[in-house]
Image (cartoon, rainbow, N blue to C red):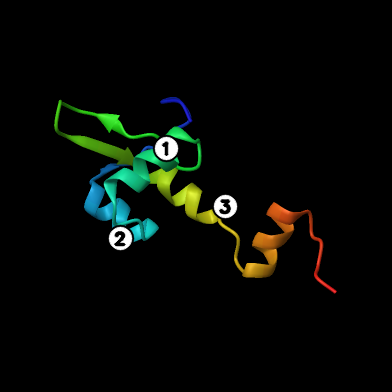
Amino acid sequence: MNQQERPTQDRMISFQRVSDISGYKSKNTLKTKEDRGEFPKRIYLSGNCVRWWESEVMEWTRQLPRSFKEYQQRHDGGVEAV
């Protein structure tokens, strides 16, 4: 999402808020997910201060599977055990 597409009410959120939303409690796990393209990238405001766009994190939550069956279909091609 570029700046022109960003909602006007969007805000930057801290790791604590991202952790509350995503359930990820480890900064290392979150960074690994970002590097793999499985989570929105952080924005560095300074050397020790990072934030995420709230709209990107919320969009990520909307794309999560809603059930284990949906997860299996996405990752296993929908093959069910007999």
In the image: residue 63, left or right of residue 52: right
In the image: residue 48, left or right of residue 40: left
Whole-angstrom CA distance, mark 3 to mark 1, is 15 Å
In the image: residue 57, left or right of residue 27: right
Asked where in the image residue 41 lies, by quadrant, the reply is top left
Residue visible at 69% across and 61% down?
Answer: 72
Query: Where is the C terminus found, in terms of image quarters?
Result: bottom right
Residue visible at 29% across and 30% down?
Answer: 43
For marks 1 and 2, the one nearer the N-term is 2
Name the residue beneath numbered marker 1.
Answer: 34
For marks 3 and 2, the one nearer the N-term is 2
x, y percent for residue 31: 35, 39
Is 35 situated above or below 59? Answer: above
Name the residue beneath numbered marker 3.
Answer: 63
Name the residue beneath numbered marker 2.
Answer: 20
Asked where in the image residue 79 lies, by quadrant, the reply is bottom right
Is 33 situated above or below 48? Answer: below
Label 2: element kind: helix
For marks 3 and 1, the one nearer the N-term is 1
Closest to the camera, between mark 1 and mark 2, is 1
Name the amino acid, label 1.
Glu
Name the amino acid, label 3.
Gln
Is 3 situated above or below 8? Answer: above
Residue visible at 62% across and 69% down?
Answer: 67
Whole-angstrom CA distance, mark 3 to mark 2, is 17 Å
Q: Which mark is drawn over residue 56?
A: none
Asked where in the image residue 64 lies, by quadrant, the reply is bottom right
x, y percent for residue 47: 15, 26
